[in-house]
Structure formats: structure tokens, C-alpha cells
Amino acid sequence: MSAQKIGLFFGSFNPIHMGHLIIANLMVETTDLKKVWFVISPQNPFKPSKGLLHEFDRYDLVRAAIFDNYKLEASDIEFNLPKPSYTIHTLVHLREKHPEKDFKVIIGEDNLVNFAKWKNYQQILLDYGLYVYPRPNTQLSELRSHPNVTCIEAPMLDISATFIRSCIKKKQSVRYLVPDAVEERIRAKGFYQD
């Protein structure tokens, strides 16, 4: 029985938007990944970022965004790991916790270009592997041809969370940029107003 393949989509998701959801859904519908977990990054205690919503609020928004898709899950695994959280530490921890699963890392092509700067990047490539989605204006990386790198076809999405936060601050609509359930929560709780 082969291990269930899970794609890990790391990010601050501040807030989660349609671009994230389209990529995650394409990953589970067009590849051999059985599920995609959104791994919400905690706030870095060394770099507290103004405008970064509390991790539990971002986790709630992700859950609201994906509630009706059983192939997508929200993960708060990094909230309790040592900070700053390095991808390799999270992967090793997840593998210990879920030995029956085969974890893959989902990244944009813009991150592939600098991937060799990641902590223990060779171990991530060899022991886990990458699923890469296209990003606008990205130079091609020689890692594309690595046997553990899978490039998927997907639309070039350039929806930015910064742009969404700016719209909310200006009281402009973010309809179609984020799921309705996410917009409702953001409005009801007054997120991104200050």
C-alpha cells in the first residue's frame, strides 16, 4: 500500500484568496496529490509584522474558505514548533507524526529560483520533493529538470494579499478576490481596518 501523497502549501495567507484556492484545487484535481494542506505560518517573533493578522484568525479564514472541499485542509502545525519555522523542521515533524503520508512541498516558480538558499534544500528535494506552479515574470530555474520536481500547468495568477488588504482599508469591495465566507468574516470582525 503506497503512502497517501499530501501537498503542503505554506504561507501567511494574510488573507487567503482565490489565487491560493485555484492553485490548491488544481493540485488535487490534476496531480497524484490526494489532499492539499494549507500550512499557515505563525508570526515570526523576531520580525513582528504590522498588518499581519493573528495566526488563529488567519487559520479561521482558511477554514472558512475551504469548508466545502474535503480535499483541502487547514493546518496549524507550525504554531507550536520552534520559531522561526523552517520548512525542513516542519516536514521532519510531520513525517514523524504521520509516517503513513508522503509529503510534497507546493511552491511557486518564483521560489524555485532561490530554492537553493533554503535551509537543507537538498534534503527537502531528496526526501520530499516539490510541486511547482507557474508565476508571472519568473526566470527559469535549472531545478525544473530535477527528478523530484513536478511542474504543473496552471493559470498565471497574480492576486496579491497586499492589494486585498489595501482595498479593505479603503472600504472597497474584494468580491471575487476572496471567497464570500472570507469577505464576510473580515467585514464582521473588522480585520485589516487600521
Image (tube, rainbow, N blue to C red):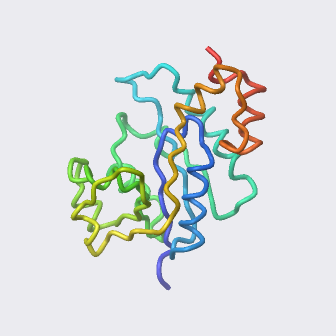
Residue in the image at 57% along x and 27% along y: 53
* Extreme-bottom residue of the structure: 1
Residue in the image at 46% along x and 30% along y: 43
Residue 122 in which image quadrant: bottom left
Q: Is residue 85 above or below residue 121?
A: above
Number of numbered labels in the structure image: 0
Residue 21: x percent and y percent? 61, 53
Q: Is residue 66 left or right of residue 19?
A: right
Quick one: 141 or 120, which is closer to the camera?
141
Quick one: 34 or 115, which is closer to the camera?
115
Residue 172 in which image quadrant: top right
Q: Can you say which quadrant of the picture contains the C terminus?
A: top right
Q: Is residue 12 above or below residue 165?
A: below
Residue 189: x percent and y percent? 74, 24
Residue 99: x percent and y percent? 44, 67
Q: Is residue 46 left or right of residue 166?
A: left
Quick one: 152 or 56, which is closer to the camera?
152
* Extreme-front residue of the structure: 137
Residue 57: x percent and y percent? 63, 32
Residue in the image at 33% along x and 50% along y: 111
Quick one: 119 or 1, which is closer to the camera?
119
Residue in the image at 59% along x and 28% along y: 165
